[in-house]
Amino acid sequence: MNKVKKTAPSTNFMSGTSNPRQKQRERADARFRWYGLAALGLAFAFLIFFFIDIIGQALPAFHQTEVKVTVNYAEAVKSNYNKAVEHKLRRVVSRAWLRTLPRYLAAHPDLVGTSRDEWVPADSRVDQYIKQHDGHGLKTKYQHIVDAMQKENRVRQVFNSGFFNSGDSKLPENAGILAAAVGSVFTLLLTMLVAVPIGVMTAIYLEEFAADNHLTRLIEVNINNLAAIPSILYGLLGLAIFINFMGVPRSSALAGGLTLALMTLPIIIIATRAALRSVPESIRDAAYGLGASSLQVVWHHVLPLAMPGILTGSIIGLAQAMGETAPLIIVGMMAYIPEPPTSILDATTVLPAQVYTWSTESLRGYGERTAAGILVLLTVLLSLNAIAVKLRNRAQQEW
Amino acid sequence: MSTADLIFWFFGGLIPLSAMAFFLARGKALTAENSQRLHSRPGFYGLYAVIWLALPALAVSLLASIAHMFHLFSVPPIMLLTSALALGGAGLWFALGQVKADFRARQSVEKVMRGLIFTAATISILTTVGIVLSVIFESIRFFQVIPIWDFITGTQWQPDTAFLIGAGRADESVAPPLFGSLPIFAGTFMITLIAMLVAVPIGLFAAIYMSEYASHNARGRIKPMLEILAGIPTVVYGFFAAITISPLVVDAAHAFGLEADYTNALAPGLIMGVMIIPFISSLSDDVIRAVPQSLRDGSLALGTTKAETIRHIVLPAAFPGIVSAFLLAVSRAIGETMIVVMAAGLRPNMTANPLEGMTTVTVKIVEALTGDQEFDSAFTLSAFALGLVLLLITLALNIVSTIIVRKFRQRYE
């Protein structure tokens, strides 16, 4: 108040005076606006840097090096797969591919005794060497061999389809995201089946049926608190209650899905309540006036109108559950899983947990696969969020 | 027959049977409606039949699983399955008999549905109880071995010998394990501090710009872009902090002639700050926009500049809301796990130098619970004690922020 009084007589904001104090205030005013712009600029600069960095790290993983070698389908290969290629090439071709040969030969007996030139996947170290990454770990001896092969056009890069249709592997060139992706789908389906109905029902209870009493207020406060509890504590709950007490198998999609469902519940409840609240009271009154019961009012009139909001909240909650790692690590979902799970009780891993497992591996070949896994995860999550935002914008209805 | 098969066949049987029950009962009611006037719409008789089919079957399976859980008795899966479905069948038969003109199907269905909805609402309470119980029980076991005072005030965290004692193989030569949590909390505090130093100025100024300067359209574009930052999974931030930011920090420190660990506290702190920016900006944006326009108009009419109005009028009015957003952000930073697991250190370290490696509460919880878990070893149990402290801190912050909002918000309304 004091300050304003002092400066008020000299203030003439219509035409900017030459008063030095006034100039100073105007400069401060402009500066303040720039602080805001700078803050946003910093945030967006980070976002751009982040995406360029991740994409730059991930892109090489979508190409896999192949080498052309003479494969010798001798009878002996059935017992010792190393005999299929020249001795010096044994560390150049992928061991994962070599291992499949005995079974391949058993399935194709007519090939026994023949030999031919074939494009086969290269070892991860060769792959990293060709991509000129630091720390590729390829010995000088093999570097010369690979250089020579490159001169003879016996090295090429192809699209890495194995990344999408195989599971985890101890050999980086063979590791893919299929098992983790299937695990994510299993876990999320369970989360959705548990969290969405319970969340929506809770919201309906609180918005439409609950009397204003202590129990209702307790539930409300409790839900707000649950929304703020760190996700890792849900992992402790899953471990102590679901796994140790109820006997749900560790690492299973069931344990992970239930844990994530409890974590997602508050998000869905809060979003659904907001959606229910935005449905005008007149709609309910009209339905009651026509003789509908309270359940009919909710089921036939309020829910359909609130549906877009509920869907948005559910999608956002599930997207968050899909990117969550910490509670799943606690319930053991970071095991080494090479095969996609077939039931909800099998040991399973999920995409973010797979990313975490790969990021702890020291071999250079896993680094780019980690980034590629991240890129896949981000693509799915950002599309989910974009769908949610689109839905929300379309659903914003004026009553 | 495995448990998975049992679950599969149970629900695989129950869902089509329920659909069948619905259409059977509704069909019967529809036929009855031709000759007489029923009390309820046919669909309610259908739902009534579904309830009588599903509830007994679910009750039997629930009873069996509870009995199995407490090792009271176990029923062969086939028997369980047939008895559950047989009971459901009996229920269906009874419900079909009830399709009569004077039977109030609507009232019965509504009663059950209300019960169902109420049960769903109590699950959130059960979740809280579950979290509290799971943390407290194991913590009590931990504090039976390790005195609570040593845990709170100790400055040494050396749990390596705990598993020997847990396995009963300890002798005189084994040094007792030390569970002093102070250095762990110091690390948590340091990383949280760095995160808030990043997130609060950027988030607050972004919120001020969005609410006070940006046009409606610009705001509609900026806000979703900022929220992308909140949509990025923490494991991705952790990877980014460990692979990209940590080496940058080390290089930058070298440029200034300083030594930095690759597990320095600065990298996870900075990235965690970035993660929290949208959290602070969204909440602050909401409270700043909730400040009545008349306050701004009054101030501007007195001849203040826009910046002065924001600094002296709008921000003080929005201050309780901003403080509450800040507290919620702090609790999120303290509980954040993946970023610190991947980018911070494992070694507890009490230091004020953010370039050194430090560890946090969440890192220690994850460390204790991955790999072999032995619930008789203080090392595994320590995770639950740390979890208890984490829970208490989060709840306290949340409650304080709620109180601040409730106490000060109505001043301008």
Image (cartoon, coloured by chain):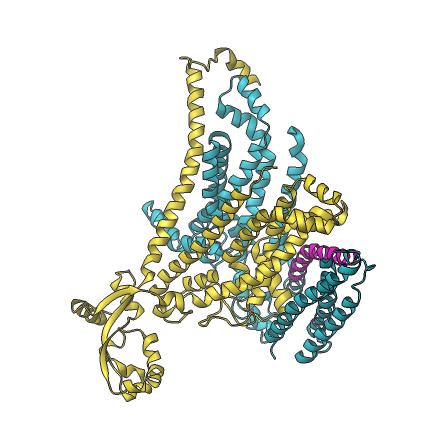
Note the chain letter of the cyan one: B
Q: Is residue B339 visible?
A: no
Residue B270 coordinates in the image, percent (x, y):
44, 47
- A360 left or right of A284? left
In the orientation shown, which residue stands out farthest toward the right? B102
Location of residue A241 by image quarter: bottom right
Please state the total of marks drawn on the protein image.
0
Foreground of the two, A113 or B36? B36
The secondary structure that most of the magenta stretch takes on is: helix
Residue B89 coordinates in the image, percent (x, y):
73, 72
Residue A69 coordinates in the image, percent (x, y):
23, 75
User: Which residue occupies 35% across, 79% down?
Assistant: A100
Which span of residues is magenta-colored?
B107-135
Note the chain letter of the yellow one: A
In the orientation shown, which residue stands out farthest toward the top? A9
Foreground of the two, B186 or B410? B410
**Magenta highlight on residue A106:** no
Residue B292 coordinates in the image, percent (x, y):
60, 28
Image quadrant occupied by the N terminus of chain A: top right
Foreground of the two, A48 or A364? A48
**Magenta highlight on residue B117:** yes
In the orientation shown, which residue stands out farthest toward the bottom? A75
Q: Is residue B139 visible?
A: yes
Residue B8 sits above or below residue A22 on the image:
below
- B124 left or right of A346? right
Residue A309 sits above or below residue B46 on the image:
above
Image quadrant occupied by the C terminus of chain A: top right
Location of residue B329 by image quarter: top right
